[in-house]
Image: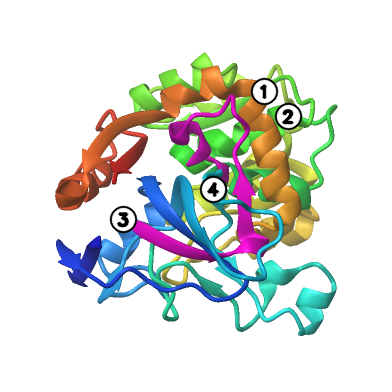
């Protein structure tokens, strides 16, 4: 099978691998589309904490099941599916408590011997495979994973429908975090960015937008949230954004960190202490978040199709990485067609 293989930092080539075999509780998926995530871009540039060359990139996927193991019970050959791309031990205290996303020996697609989704075929345990509703296209199905990231952040942030929320950053994760907050009944969700194309896309989804290069967040939102926002979700890795979030939330507010920071950054501890601000990290998702993600996709498929801005081929992955690396480009979710 052909794969998108990160041979070294800054270089992906098409490389042939044997089609992987499946275990008794696994399924083999013919990949139709694979999404390019920001973490793939970090891996490409050598800045991701655990995704490192050499490896097959990719963990966002939608495709068709072509083979199943002897112990597979619910998934059938021919099913259209997506995958929650993590494997956990199942026995540690985190796994037993339903927090398997925090399992210390968890393996994500593309690392730990599990081949990534930039490949013609992908193997996954049945437990982490989800059938796509007939109304959802493969393009929409590939958004289940990034949307689940946003759902998890909103859920552990305990978002309430009467609250005021802001998301810093309108890449795919930022926009989909705002969509997740909307699904919890919050009417006015704000997003910030410097990219007018991304902000326009967010606005088309009913999200209030602010270009921080042209507008003051505080001035634009004062009449709506004079005491500050109840919750801020950080989905960009700019060091200044963390302290910006601390200034934007009210006293007693919450800041949820979704973005993956690869170096230490200074944080204003005085503001945290004086204002009793809660800061919480958000680490991917669980099955609860994935199921909710699929429900949202079913309800809003037509709206969310505009998040997919590009289709590219396996031999164009290097170009895809360069496209996403420019914060001014008109690119959101790039899909690799297999």
Q: Is residue 177 above or below residue 243?
A: above
Name the residue at 76% across, 84% down.
Answer: 92
| Left or right of 193, for residue 1 | left
The answer to whether any part of residue 235 appears in the image is yes
Q: Residue at x 39, y 30 (%)?
A: 308
Query: Which residues are the magenta region?
Result: 119-144
Q: Which quarter of the picture shows residue 104?
A: bottom right
Q: Are marks 2 and 1 in contact (CB under 8 Å)?
A: yes
Q: Which residue is nearer to you in this view: 230 or 203? A: 203
- Position of 160 with respect to 58 (left or right) is right
Residue that numbered label 4 is attached to = 82
- Report if residue 219 lies within the magenta region: no
How many marks are shown on the rendered structure? 4
CA–CA distance between discs 2 and 4? 21 Å
First in sequence: mark 3 vs mark 4: 4
Can residue 10 be seen by looking at this rendering?
Answer: no
Tell me the element at label 1: helix
Magenta stretch encompasses residue 136: yes
- Residue 179, image quadrant: top right
Residue receiving disc 1: 299
- Distance from disc 3 to disc 4, alpha carbons, whole Å, reads 14 Å
> How many neighbours does mark 4 have within 10 angstroms: few (below 14), some (14-19), or many (20 or more)?
many
Numbered circle sitting on residue 140: none
Residue 129 in picture, x, y percent from top left? 60, 55
**Which residue in the protein does label 3 denote?**
120
SS of the residue under disc 3 = loop
Nearer to us: label 3 or label 4: 3
| Earlier residue among tags 1 and 3 | 3
**Residue identifier under label 2:** 183
First in residue order: circle 2 vs circle 3 = 3
Vertical arrangement, residue 204 with respect to residue 240, above or below: above
Q: Residues within 10 Å of mark 2 (few under 14, many from 20)?
A: some
């Amino acid at each position: 099978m052909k794969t998108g293989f990160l041979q070294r930092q800054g270089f992906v080539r098409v490389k042939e691998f044997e089609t992987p075999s499946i275990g008794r509780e696994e399924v083999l998926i013919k990949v139709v589309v694979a999404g390019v995530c920001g973490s793939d871009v970090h891996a490409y540039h050598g800045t991701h904490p655990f995704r490192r060359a050499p490896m097959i990139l990719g963990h966002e996927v939608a495709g068709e099941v072509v083979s199943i193991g002897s112990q597979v019970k619910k998934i059938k050959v021919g099913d259209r599916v997506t995958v929650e791309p993590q494997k956990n031990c199942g026995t540690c205290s985190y796994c037993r408590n339903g927090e398997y996303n925090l399992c210390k020996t968890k393996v994500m697609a593309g690392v730990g011997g599990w081949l990534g989704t930039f490949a013609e075929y992908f193997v996954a345990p049945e437990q982490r495979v989800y059938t796509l509703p007939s109304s959802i296209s493969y393009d929409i199905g590939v958004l289940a994973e990034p949307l689940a990231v946003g759902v998890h952040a909103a859920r552990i942030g305990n978002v309430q429908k009467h609250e005021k929320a802001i998301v810093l950053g309108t890449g795919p994760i930022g926009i989909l975090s705002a969509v997740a907050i909307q699904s919890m009944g919050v009417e006015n969700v704000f997003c910030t960015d410097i990219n007018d194309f991304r902000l326009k896309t967010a606005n088309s989804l009913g999200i209030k937008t602010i270009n921080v290069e042209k507008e003051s967040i505080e001035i634009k939102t004062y009449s709506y949230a004079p005491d500050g926002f109840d919750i801020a979700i950080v989905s960009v890795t700019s060091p200044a954004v963390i302290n910006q979030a601390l200034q934007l939330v009210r006293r007693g507010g919450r800041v949820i960190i979704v973005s993956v920071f690869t170096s230490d950054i200074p944080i204003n501890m005085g503001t945290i202490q004086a204002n009793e601000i809660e800061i919480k990290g958000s680490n991917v998702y669980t099955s609860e978040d994935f199921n909710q993600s699929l429900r949202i996709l079913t309800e809003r498929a037509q709206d969310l199709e505009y998040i997919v801005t590009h289709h590219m081929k396996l031999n164009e992955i290097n170009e895809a990485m360069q496209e996403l690396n420019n914060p001014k480009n008109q690119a959101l979710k790039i899909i690799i067609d297999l």
